[in-house]
Image (spheres, rainbow, N blue to C red):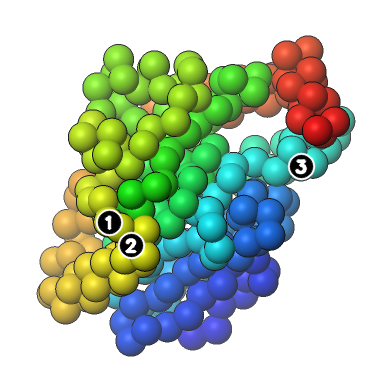
Amino acid sequence: MEYDLPDVVRVAADGPVRIVRLSRPDQLNAINEELHLGLTRLFPQLSADPDARVAVLTGAGAAFSAGGDFDLLDRMANDVQLRRTVIAEGRELVLNMIRCRIPVVTAVNGPAVGLGCSLIALSDVVYMAESAYLADPHVAVGLVAADGGPLVWPTQTSLLLAKEYAFTGARIPAARATEIGLANHICPDAEVFDAALAAAHKLAELPQQAVESTKRVMNLHLERAVLATIDFAMACETESFDTPDLRANVDRFLKR
């Protein structure tokens, strides 16, 4: 099957496994408008691929994703229509990933920040490199965290821990992420992708209908929790773009 995606989201076949790479390595796979749209379109296409049984999601280069591109945040603060479009895509992306037919095994090859962290939270099995970490700095930047991380973390770890990491945006090292239930396995950096790929192939060998329906059974819990909160969260994030805190933080970053 041919995938209709921008070049910044690359899909390759390895038998029944689809290897998906976020591909802005020179920008540490920061989420710009093109990558955001590509990720939104990705998961329905994975579901529609009749030969796909499992996906492996990873980043090209040294990072999984450095989070939101500040040029995009600047444009969203100044362009209400762009803001509405991207935030609507964010809602669609979250639900598309939750509803994806096939299991998503993620190889966190480096820092996973912001929306990158959200992709980890929405994955089915997570392998983290020893040097990798998670962080969701939405609140620290001045945004309501509406698209993954804190939206999903209360279903995966304690509410107290979810609040602490959402409020502070503090880094969650691989060992800590595994300890508190935000990742499954830690691997040496050079081995994380191979470990995730091997796990994906093992899943692909299991009975297909049983795997996919079991994933759906469990993700129905996740989807119901997300649907209870996501519209409020998205509306609040939209308001965040008009706050002086967000404007000051974006200006500070762009001046670096």
Residue for point 36% across, 37% down:
173
Residue for point 21% across, 35% down:
179
Quadrant occupied by the C terminus: top right
Asked whether the residues under the numbered discs 2 and 1 touch, taking CB atoms below 8 Å apart as contact, a structural biologist would say yes
- Which three-letter amino acid code belongs to the residue tagged 3? Leu
Q: Residues within 10 Å of mark 3 (few under 14, many from 20)?
A: some
Which residue is nearer to you in this view: 8 or 78? 8
Which residue is nearer to you in this view: 94 or 24? 24
Eyeballing the image, is 99 above or below 152? below
Mark 2 or mark 1, earlier in chain: 1
- The residue at which mark 1 appears reads as 187
- The residue at which mark 3 appears reads as 72
- The residue at which mark 2 appears reads as 192
Task: Locate residue 62, reporting x and y percent.
Answer: 54, 57
The kind of secondary structure element at disc 1 is strand
Could you tell me how far apart the alpha carbons at marks 2 and 3 are, in whole angstroms? 30 Å
The kind of secondary structure element at disc 3 is helix
Residue for point 49% across, 85% down:
1
Eyeballing the image, is 255 above or below 166? below
Mark 2 or mark 3, earlier in chain: 3
Is residue 81 visible in the rendered image? The answer is no
